[in-house]
Image (cartoon, grey):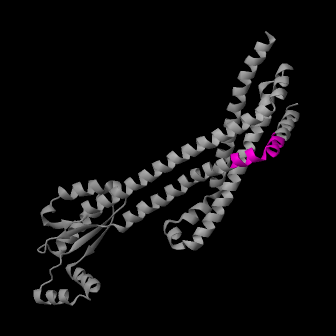
């Protein structure tokens, strides 16, 4: 009996989808747009997370020491900094290395080179380039340096400026994520509303049939079955079309914008997580279809019961 009812619901649901081609097309398009935005949230989160990590990896915390600080003192400070929580690595740059690096970068400027020769002594100081494991440790490291015993040996450090860069990047990422989440919720509601209205129209076209089934004692589940199948079809095909669009888009973009996509690993992230990506898309699409169909039919059945009760009285 259950299998028979299920087959009847599937056949009736497919017939409704094929019969209302314009409504079916409009509903599926709404689902595709909604699912594209939901998928975009996952990809954009990965892109901007990679973007933030890329900034953090490029920004070093550089401590410049006074010219009278000896090499042994700087190396001792380096060993001390290696034990500080959040410090991943510390690179020592001597005065000689700093001068050589400066000449390599600015050797084309003859005025500067002559000025260095006239000075005679090396005007550049030794430094420590500190690589931080996570940006959340920046303030802790800054506090440690300000309260350290060697604070008076430090001439300058670029930590505060770098912290501002990373904070601004994090604010940008958060703002973009909030925007995408808002748009996803908005288009998800639109998809559900379109599906809800399309099912209501299908119900209106079959209102006499539904009323007769209610009069002869058909259960709500028996009546709802075909419409739930209809909603599942909308969601499933919307998800499949969305996956095809993303596959084509990711492949094309990996060719056209290979350097950008390679930098943030977008293509590799998408294809390596494609199965999870597909399951989430299909699951969300079907869930939208079931919920919108269920509420549409339930709303009509409540009105129908009241109408039939009034007619009997």
Quadrant for the C terminus, please: top right
- Tell me residue 54's x, y (percent): 42, 65
Q: Does the magenta stretch include residue 53?
A: no
Vertical arrangement, residue 9 with respect to residue 144, above or below: above
Quadrant for the N terminus, please: top right
Query: Which of the 4 image quadrants contains residue 78?
Result: bottom left
- Name the main secondary structure of what is drawn in magenta: helix
Residue at image coords 46%, 61%? 50
- In the image, the segment drawn in magenta is 13-28
Residue at image coords 71%, 27%? 298
* 94 or 286, nearer to the observer: 286
- Tell me residue 217's x, y (percent): 84, 20
Vertical arrangement, residue 86 with respect to residue 299, above or below: below
Vertical arrangement, residue 292 with respect to residue 171, above or below: above
Vertical arrangement, residue 303 with respect to residue 263, above or below: above
Q: In this view, does 82 lie to the left or right of 154?
A: right
Q: Is residue 17 magenta?
A: yes
- Tell me residue 260's x, y (percent): 50, 70
- Tell me residue 5's x, y (percent): 85, 33
For the question of whether residue 28 can be seen, the reply is yes
Residue at image coords 50%, 45%? 182
* 168 or 194, nearer to the observer: 194
Query: Which of the 4 image quadrants contains residue 124?
Result: bottom left
Residue at image coords 62%, 63%? 271
């Amino acid at each position: 009996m259950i299998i028979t009812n299920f087959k009847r619901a599937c056949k009736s649901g497919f017939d409704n989808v094929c019969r209302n081609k314009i409504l079916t097309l409009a509903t599926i398009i709404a689902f595709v747009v909604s699912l594209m935005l939901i998928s975009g949230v996952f990809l954009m989160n990965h892109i901007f997370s990679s973007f933030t990590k890329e900034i953090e990896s490029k920004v070093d915390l550089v401590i410049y020491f006074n010219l009278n600080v000896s090499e042994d003192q700087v190396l001792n400070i380096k060993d001390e900094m290696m034990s500080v929580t959040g410090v991943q690595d510390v690179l020592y740059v001597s005065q000689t290395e700093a001068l050589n690096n400066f000449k390599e970068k600015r050797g084309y400027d003859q005025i500067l080179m002559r000025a260095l020769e006239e000075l005679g002594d090396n005007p550049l100081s030794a430094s420590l380039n500190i690589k931080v494991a996570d940006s959340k440790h920046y303030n802790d490291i800054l506090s440690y340096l300000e309260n350290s015993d060697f604070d008076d040996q430090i001439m300058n450090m670029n930590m505060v400026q770098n912290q501002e860069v990373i904070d601004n990047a994090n604010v940008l990422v958060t703002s973009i994520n909030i925007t995408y989440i808002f748009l996803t919720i908005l288009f998800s509601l639109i998809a559900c509303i379109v599906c809800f209205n399309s099912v209501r129209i299908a119900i209106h076209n079959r209102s006499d049939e539904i009323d007769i089934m209610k009069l002869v004692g058909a259960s709500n589940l028996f009546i709802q079955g075909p419409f739930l199948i209809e909603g599942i079809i909308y969601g499933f095909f919307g998800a499949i079309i969305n996956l095809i669009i993303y596959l084509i888009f990711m492949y094309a973009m990996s060719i056209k914008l290979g350097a950008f996509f390679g930098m943030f690993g977008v293509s590799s992230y998408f294809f390596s997580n494609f199965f999870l990506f597909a399951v989430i898309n299909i699951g969300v699409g079907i869930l939208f279809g079931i919920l919108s169909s269920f509420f549409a039919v339930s709303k009509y059945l409540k009105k129908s019961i009241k109408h039939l009760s009034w007619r009997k009285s």
